[in-house]
Structures are given as structure tokens and as C-alpha cells.
Image (tube, grey):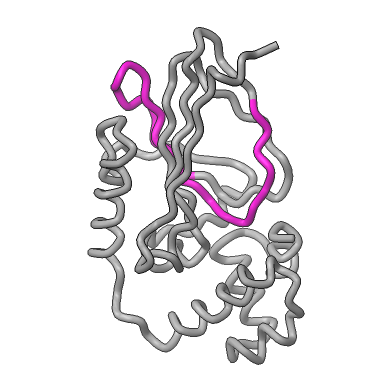
Amino acid sequence: MPNTNDIKYREERPDKLLADIVKCFWLCENLSDVGRQFTIIPDGYFDLTFRFRENNIEKTTLTGLWTSPVEISIPAKAKILGIRFKLLAVDKILKYKISSIVNSRIELPHKFWPCSKDNFELLIDESTDFIKSGLLKKEKSDLKRQRLFQMLYNSNGSVKIEKLSKSANWSSRQMNRYFNDRFGVSLKEYCKVLR
């Protein structure tokens, strides 16, 4: 039986200005001499992760949305720092569609994001500054998306599509096209993940 004291996990909420973009910053560290297996349950968010061993960055990874549970492993003596993003980050920060990586992940160059040290507080500070510097002035279309996602997150996906359509001033067809194009899932499928 694995010792649960060998795994260290921590989450920090973002600065209020980032609340529409970032769900949380997180740290998971395997202190043991053996790798550990975990099951990730879909939550409606996607992650940018940085894996370190012996203070050296090994891997930078971007996940897509998970629509079903997935098994992952954390190598022995590894530390993973992560940013759990809300979907609005795809348009506002990353400028990278995640539709091609549903239920998977891709490795990115280490310079994709400012994270070179395995220091959790530094990741939070540098990422907060990086995101704030990349935020554009809110355009009309951004306000539509912002309203849409606020309703989705506040209702945990249990809001009716018709109500979303009226509130966000988008047709259900437009919203579905947007979701399929950017995230690789329909709006209805995303709502099921959030529930």
C-alpha cells in the first residue's frame, strides 16, 4: 500500500483579475522512490503543467479537455507545477485552439511559458504577471464569451442551452461551432463534463 505522505498536493486561487481565466495554480510532488499512478476525473478545465526532477525542468505539457477519466503517472521524486485554466484562456491568453487535444496532451517547448524553476510561488507570480500583460481590452465578443462561461461555471453546466443562448446573445448553432472549433467538444458535451 503506497504511503499517502509521499504525495504532496496544494492549490492556490488566482488573483481576482484572473478569475475568468485561471481556476487555480497547483503543485503535486511525489516524494517517494517509486512512481505513482492516479486517475484524473474530468472537471471542465484544461492544464498547463511543468514537470521537474532534481530542480531541472523535464517536460512542459498542455492538456486538452478530458471527457472521461484518465490514468496518469508521476515519476519518483518528481514535482509537477500546474495552471488549471478556464476555457476563456484559449482565446484571451494562449491563442491556441485545444480542439485537437481532447482527452490527450501535447508536449510544448520549455520557453512556451515563463516557468524555469520548481518554485510554486514564483510560478504564481510570474504567471500572474504574464497573463495580466497579455490580457486585451474587452471587446464585445469577449463580453459574450465571458457571460457564457460565467453562466456555465455558476450552474455547473446545468443551465439550459436556450437560456445560455438568450443571455449570451448567441445562437445555439454559433455556440456549438465555437465549442467544437476551440475545444473539440459540443456545448452539450461540455455541460455534461461540468456536471
**Quarter of the picture holding the N terminus:** top right
Seen at 45% across and 62% down, the residue is 90
Q: Is residue 144 magenta?
A: no
Magenta segment, principal secondary structure? strand
Please provide the residue range marked out in magenta: 38-62
Q: Position of residue 39 (x, y in %)?
A: 68, 33
Q: Position of residue 38 (x, y in %)?
A: 64, 28
- The one of 38 and 189 positioned closer to us in this rendering: 38
**Above or below — where is 172 with respect to 79?**
below
Seen at 30% across and 69% down, the residue is 135
Q: Dividing the picture into quarters, in which one does residue 96 lie?
A: bottom left
Give the total of numbered labels. Answer: 0
Does 189 sit left or right of 131 as displayed?
Answer: right
Does 49 sit left or right of 151 as displayed?
Answer: left
Seen at 56% across and 73% down, the residue is 149
Does 110 sit left or right of 23 as displayed?
Answer: left
- The one of 125 and 54 positioned closer to us in this rendering: 125
Q: Position of residue 179 (x, y in %)?
A: 61, 68
- The one of 79 and 134 positioned closer to us in this rendering: 79
Seen at 64% across and 45% down, the residue is 103
**Quarter of the picture holding the C terminus:** bottom right
Residue farthest toward the top in the current orientation of the protein: 33
Q: Position of residue 128 (x, y in %)?
A: 29, 56
**Above or below — where is 117 with respect to 56?**
below
Q: Is residue 50 magenta?
A: yes
